[in-house]
Image (cartoon, rainbow, N blue to C red):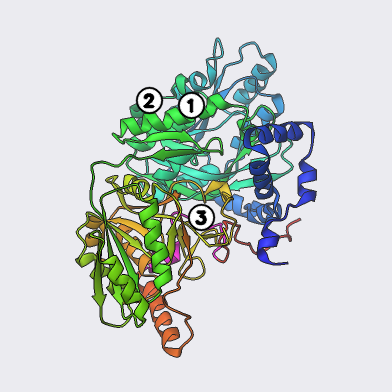
Amino acid sequence: MNKKEKAGRIQWNRMLKKLNPYTIKKGFRYLKHYGPKEFWIRLHERFEPEEVPYGPWYEAYVPDESELEKQRKHRFTYEPLISVAVPAFRTPETFLIQMVESLLAQTYSNWELCIANGSPEDTVMKGVLEQYMKKDSRIRVSELTENKGIAGNTNAALEMAEGEFVGLLDHDDLLAPNALYEVVRALEADRELDAVYTDEDKVTTELDEHFQPHLKPDFNLDLLRSNNYICHFFVVRRSVVKKAGGFRQEFDGAQDHDFIFRCVETARKVGHISEILYHWRTHKASTADNPASKMYAFDAGKRAIEAHLERTGTEGVVTHTPDLGFFRVKYPVQGNPLVSIIIPNKDEKETLKDCIESIRKKTEYENYEIIIVENNSTTEEIFQYYKELSQDPRIRLLRWKKEFNYSAINNYGVSHARGEYLLFLNNDVKIITPGWIKEMLGVCQRPEVGAVGVKLIYPDNTIQHAGCVIGIGGIAGHMFVDMPANRTGYLHKASILQDMSAVTAACMMMKRTAFEEAGGFTEKLSVAFNDVDLCLKVRKNKKLIVYDPYVELYHMESKTRGAEDSTEKVRRFQEEIEYMRCQWIDILKNGDPYYNKNLSLTKWNYSLRPLQGMGRKQ
């Protein structure tokens, strides 16, 4: 069985285990929402075999008792009081007890639990809370006279807080025992942090199965505008909360997304702890497991993003994607800047012709020029084609007479380009998306953005590139290679706008200023990793690299340079690897900030990195 057939399989036994009247009903809701074809694709994504099953992985991952004991004895030089704010309303007794017990089990002791109880009529809840208040003075309860809704109840809990930092916990969820310890460890290491968030997973009602881990990147503005990926566990300096303002009732359903936006807009620095420290309980009333039924929540999410764009003075149109809870921001083009499309070419007449014709047919944006850098072609037909092209006033031909060096050729192209924006393009691509330049330009014009890359698809409709991760396969690798292009991948990452460390220059738009500040392509890297290196230099200058999946191109991949099979080519490739290792040792050692240390560096699909001891714990 080949890898594509394997990737298309449904793990039926896993799916059958999940079947009950509730999940069947939920399945019909999804079917109605997506239609048969899209529903079938999503069913495959949800139930295809996990390369590393999360159950055994999680068992090996959680700290054992000796590690927890070590944490209890640890003394930090900085031990802030952390107020954990919980809005409670008609919380089932078992859930309430388990939530409070997860605080009592914390290995860091300087915390207080602030519960705002919006169920004055619930005597069972009141009794449980009174017992805990007697048991531990760190547990404080405010008995509200009425239910003020999720935003009002949370604000009441925040008002009780006396800590330097506050953390948000839902009344039916759980913190891992090392959650606050890890938070304080991060705060001690970097005193400028005004907010931190952690990874999370989901847990069944009975707490007998952990599943769907959400392993997050470091702070990612475009991802936050696509989805509330920060979610749980979010801890923020209380002074920032005061400045940002509390929860707002008009955003109920997405009140945390709105609140997080306002906090990160105010915060000096936002940190991320790549540890699974929050367990989101799924049950019938929980939004963790009830997507298509809460349209009001998704509309509130859309409005939260719109409000954020307005506050930050960013023009953008927010729409829902087919995956509810995930959004698209479309950034309009400002003005009419010239875009210079730079295409290196050697021979390959038909390939180049397909590329040029697709640009002519599919480009809605008018103000562009094409610069073809001719690199030692030998066939008569290509020079004949160049003559035809020279009739087009938009196209200029340059001749590169030295040996092939992708970096030097593109730098040469840029030196003759007139555009304010540079669009590096391989000759072996075909445009699929008609508004491709407008879409890329709208994103690239934002002041914080340096470059934009796109989704590239093989002719067999599988993905060739959906952003690059540093460290994958040794130096850097493309994400979701060979995944069917109609799939959206882990947490829909193949199909949403997000920031990444690098994108491929097979189709990449870059601000000319960002290109020049970075010193252009490094000419020592004549074939491999030059685009990754350029992106990392742009990132070093505090500019974002954005992956934009709303532009799609077909890519035939490396038709222009042949196999890496000669001794000379192998040696050159080794030298380029060595250059990257020396130049970018920090990111290679510490890990890509837009990835997660718990994810594999040998797979391209966000699967888990296997752990030692998996399956051995009893």
Q: Is residue 160 left or right of residue 141?
A: left
Q: Secondary structure at mark 1?
A: helix
Residue 75 at least partly seen: no
Q: Earlier in the sequence, mark 1 or mark 2?
A: 2
Q: Which residues are magenta?
A: 584-601
Residue at (60% x, 24% y) in the render: 133
- Residue receiving disc 3: 596
Other-residue count near label 2 (Cα within 10 Å), few / some / many at <14 / 14–19 / ≥20: few
Tag shown at residue 154:
none
Question: Which residue matches tag 2?
Answer: 245
Residue at the image point whose x is 46% and y is 53% from the top: 432
Residue 207 point in image, percent of width and height:
71, 39
Rounded to the nearest angstrom, the CA distance separating label 1 from label 3 is: 29 Å
Mark 1 or mark 3, which has the lower sequence index?
Answer: 1
Instruction: Tell me where residue 598 appears, x and y as whole percent.
Output: 56, 57
Question: What amino acid type is highlighted by mark number 2?
Answer: Gly
| Residue kind at label 1, given as amino acid type | Ala
> Eyeballing the image, is 514 above or below 157?
below
Q: Residue at x 23, y 48 (%)?
A: 337
Q: Which residue is mark 1?
A: 300
Q: CA distance from mark 3 to mark 2?
A: 31 Å
Classify residue 461 by image quadrant.
bottom right
Seen in the picture, residue 464 relative to 225 is either above or below; the reply is below
Q: Residues within 10 Å of mark 3 (few under 14, many from 20)?
A: many
Q: Residue at x 65, y 49 (%)?
A: 45
